[in-house]
């Protein structure tokens, strides 16, 4: 119960924190400080990167006007998936899951290799009890971005706590660690892997990365 409460309280699949979102390939989001990045048709202009970073910081700080400003920014730059995912995360936190799902789905259409958008669709499906859909979404995220650590963490949690498939949980936790998952989460994940191995007799294997169909 403590473990589940911790997950629900905020560690949901090592989520991408609003304040650390940046533009990246196809205008998707990623972790780390805001910096110039590429878009589908070339580099994102530095002024767009700076404006997006400013809006994300304002939103994370609770600036109510930032929400409308970010929506306007997204409308002005429909080729960027990052703002759509950020707006979707904001809607999900506010409890508007239908709007969040629509925004995440739009992001997957804007950027066909957007792992974070599929990861958030998976997290949304998991919260709604649609565990098979969550699995497919996480697998799709991994198939598109094989080094996207949060999707492995989410998939591992799904296999450990909801489906359950402990051997696959071990495999995906291990893959999460291999691709550089959050440093502060690493000690806990290592303990979980050791515990799962003891309980399930699981042995290390390649993590599942089959694409969703």
Image: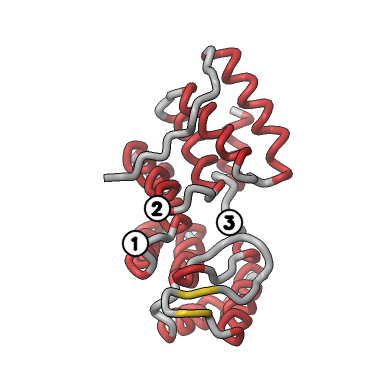
Badge 3 marks a residue whose secondary structure is loop
Q: How far apart are labels 1 and 2 at the CA level?
A: 8 Å
- Which residue carries the number 1 mark? 105
- Which residue carries the number 2 mark? 121
Please state the horizontal and vertical placement of residue 149, each as a whole percent of the image.
56, 46
Colouring method of the image: secondary structure
Q: Judge the density around disc 1: few (<14), some (14-19), many (≥20) Cα neighbours within 10 Å.
A: many
Q: How far apart are labels 3 and 1 at the CA level?
A: 17 Å
User: Which residue occupies the foreground of this view, 139 or 12?
Assistant: 139
Please state the horizontal and vertical placement of residue 17, each as a whole percent of the image.
61, 59
Look at the numbered discs 1 and 2 and tell me whether their residues touch, using CB distance below 8 Å.
yes
Residue at 50% of width from left, 25% of height from top? Answer: 205
Residue at 36% of width from left, 63% of height from top? Answer: 112
Residue 93 seen in this snapshot: yes
Tag shown at residue 16:
3
Badge 1 marks a residue whose secondary structure is helix
Residue 99 seen in this snapshot: no
Residue at 69% of width from left, 38% of height from top? Answer: 186
Q: Is residue 2 left or right of residue 23?
A: right
Tag shown at residue 196:
none
Badge 2 marks a residue whose secondary structure is helix
User: Which residue occupies the foreground of this view, 164 or 39?
Assistant: 39
The answer to whether 64 is drawn above or below residue 85 in the figure is below
């Amino acid at each position: 119960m403590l473990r589940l409460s911790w997950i629900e309280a905020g560690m949901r699949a090592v989520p991408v924190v609003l304040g650390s979102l940046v533009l990246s390939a196809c205008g998707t989001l990623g972790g780390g400080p805001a910096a110039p990045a590429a878009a589908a048709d070339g580099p994102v202009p530095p002024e767009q990167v700076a404006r997006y970073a400013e809006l994300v910081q304002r939103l994370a700080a609770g600036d109510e006007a930032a929400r409308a400003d970010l929506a306007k920014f997204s409308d002005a730059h429909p080729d960027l998936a990052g703002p759509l995912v950020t707006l979707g995360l904001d809607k999900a936190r506010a409890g508007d899951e239908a709007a969040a799902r629509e925004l995440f789905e739009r992001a997957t259409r804007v950027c066909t290799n957007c792992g974070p958008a599929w990861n958030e669709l998976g997290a949304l499906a998991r919260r709604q009890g649609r565990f098979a859909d969550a699995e497919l979404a996480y697998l799709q995220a991994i198939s598109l971005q094989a080094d996207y650590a949060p999707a492995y963490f989410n998939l591992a949690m799904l296999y450990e706590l909801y489906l359950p498939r402990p051997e696959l949980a071990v495999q995906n936790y291990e893959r999460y660690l291999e691709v550089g998952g959050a440093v502060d989460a690493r000690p806990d994940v290592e303990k979980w892997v050791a515990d799962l191995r003891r309980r399930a007799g699981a042995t290390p294997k390649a993590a599942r990365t089959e694409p969703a169909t």
